[in-house]
Amino acid sequence: MKLTIIGCGSIGRTLARYLETVDDVELVHVYDNKKEAVDTLVAECQKVRYATNLEDAFEKSDLIVETASQSAVHEYIPRALEMGKNVLVMSVGAFVEDDFKEKCRIIAKQKGCKVYIPSGAVCGIEGICAAAVEEVEEVIIMSYKPPEALRDVKYLKNKGIDIDAIKRPKVIFNGHAKDAVKHFPKNINVAATLSLAGVGIERTMVKIVIDPKATRNTHRIIAKGKFGEIECWSRNMPFPENPRTSYLAALSLISAVKKIMGSFWVGV
């Protein structure tokens, strides 16, 4: 199998290093605006090559994996789908725009390919997907984060919120997932994933709390409906290289790639 990874941040590097150990993987093309980051990875991994020409890399790949940003999803994923390539998307917030999501769905259907979305930094997504087959009344996600995970977020600066001045848990956002993903594009992709799995971006409610004593990114999901009730917690260790990202998110991506490559698919 040959893959292209768009983005050479902490998650992209983690996936590339894993793929280096997989016998069924022949080649991994990696693209990032910061070429020096790719060069370091190329020097470390024998199967990794710098994708100097993305069109060529896409053509040679069986799976395109995005680990960069919502803007990268907009720029590259439709192009990959037009080429009939399956794609795996981490920056799920890009799909809160209904027109863009529908565009990708139509292209994928026409070209006979698929858009895969991993569960990310939360548990319970498979249960929400199953519950949504029937009526779901409400879905709520509460995220508790250490201050460092939200440093330099423009929304907080515009609101005049000084995260260093917060001495006790403080709610800094409470609203719909659509707004949460817009204002925290690198911090709350789990809300977009949850929305796609359940009741949609405008009915999924999000509460974000800064906790100065927190050492982990914690998510609590509550869902109620005809199926009954779901309540689950994820207490995630932050990624060592990037405190904005939970380590579980990277592991979720690896798990998704293993499922796509394998013969068994456990869960939804």
Image (cartoon, rainbow, N blue to C red):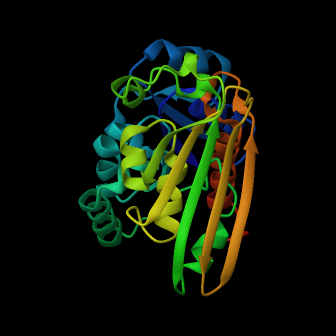
Foreground pick, 61 / 191: 191
The image position of residue 72, as x and y in percent, is: 36, 38
Specify whether 148 is left or right of 66: right
Q: Is residue 115 visible?
A: no
Q: Residue at position x 54%, y 26% from top?
A: 9
The vertical placement of 148 against 235, above or below, is above
Label count reads: 0
> Which residue is at a point 67% across and 54% down the rendered structure image?
220
* 188 over 31 or under it: above or below: below
Q: Nearer the viewer, residue 203 or 196?
A: 203
Q: Give me the residue at 74% from left, 54% from top.
A: 233
Q: Nearer the viewer, residue 163 or 257?
A: 163
At 41% from the left edge and 36% from the top edge, which residue is drawn?
A: 69
- Res 213 → quadrant: top right
Would residue 25 appear left or right of 236 to someone viewing this image? left
Location of the C terminus (image quadrant): bottom right
Determine whether 173 is above or below 10 in the image: below
Q: Position of residue 132 (x, y in %)?
A: 54, 79
The vertical placement of 195 against 248, above or below, is below
Asked if one can make out residue 104 in the rendered structure from this viewpoint, the answer is yes
Left/right placement of residue 47 relative to residue 205 reads right
In terms of image quadrants, where is residue 170?
A: top right
Expressed as whole percent of the image width and height from the top left, the position of residue 260 reads: 62, 60
Is 103 displayed left or right of 194 in the figure?
left
